[in-house]
Every structure is written in structure tokens, then in C-alpha cells.
Image (spheres, grey):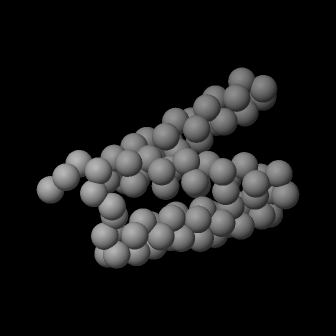
Amino acid sequence: MPISAAPTRTGRRRWVATRATNSSSSIVFGLWHSPYGASSVLSTTASGLAYGLLAVSSRSLVPGVLAHGLYDSGWAVTVLLQG
């Protein structure tokens, strides 16, 4: 198989489905945080896109889960230090 082969029809469908799924789940993730305001919705939607890209590129949920945990831990430490 040549290295520069064009994507197959199935490959293209998978690419579109992956992007659509990542986008829609990121929007839901952002909207889940809507009680905290519009800026929270936007930032968590962006975070959701990043976590989704991590999952797709690594073919595992673990990197996104770890990244989310580190982010939440950072916020917890900040809140605790501010009293």
C-alpha cells in the first residue's frame, strides 16, 4: 500500500464521526458547567475538546482523565490557599 494513499470512504466517515462526537460531547461537557457562568461554559468546552483530542490521539481515556484531575487539583489547591 502506498504511503500517500488517499483516505478511503470508510476512513473519511470515521474521521467525520470522530470529530462530530468530540465536538458534541465537548459542548455537553461545557453546558454541564453552565451554573458557573458563560465563561465557564466556554473554558470547559475548550477543555473538553482538548481532552477529546488526547483520547483520540492516544486511543485511551487515561490521559484526559489525568489531565482533568490535575486541573481540578490545581483549582482545589488554589481555593484552599486563599482560605
Residue 80 % position (x, y): 69, 30
The quadrant of the rendering that contains the C terminus is top right
Q: Would residue 29 be found to the left or right of residue 43 on screen?
A: left
Q: Which residue is pictured at 40% across the width and 75% down the height?
A: 13
Above or below — where is 17 with respect to 56? below
Residue 52 x/y as whole percent: 49, 55
Which residue does the image show at 39% across and 54% down from the upper left?
A: 56
Residue 62 in view in this figure: no
Residue 31: quarter of image: bottom right
**Closer to us: 59 or 81:** 59
Marks counted in the figure total 0
Q: Residue 37's x, y, as percent?
A: 84, 57
Q: Is residue 15 visible?
A: yes
Q: Residue furthest left?
A: 1
In the image, 60 versus 72, the foreground residue is 60
Q: Residue lying farthest top?
A: 81
Quarter placement of the N terminus: bottom left
Camera-nearest residue between 2 and 26: 2
Residue, x 44% and y 47% (percent of image)? 54
Where residue 81 sits, quadrant-wise, is: top right
Residue shown at 34% from the left, 75% from the top: 9
Depicted 28 relative to depicted 56: above or below: below
- Of residue 40 and residue 10, the one placed in the foreground of this image is 10
**Quarter of the figure with residue 76:** top right
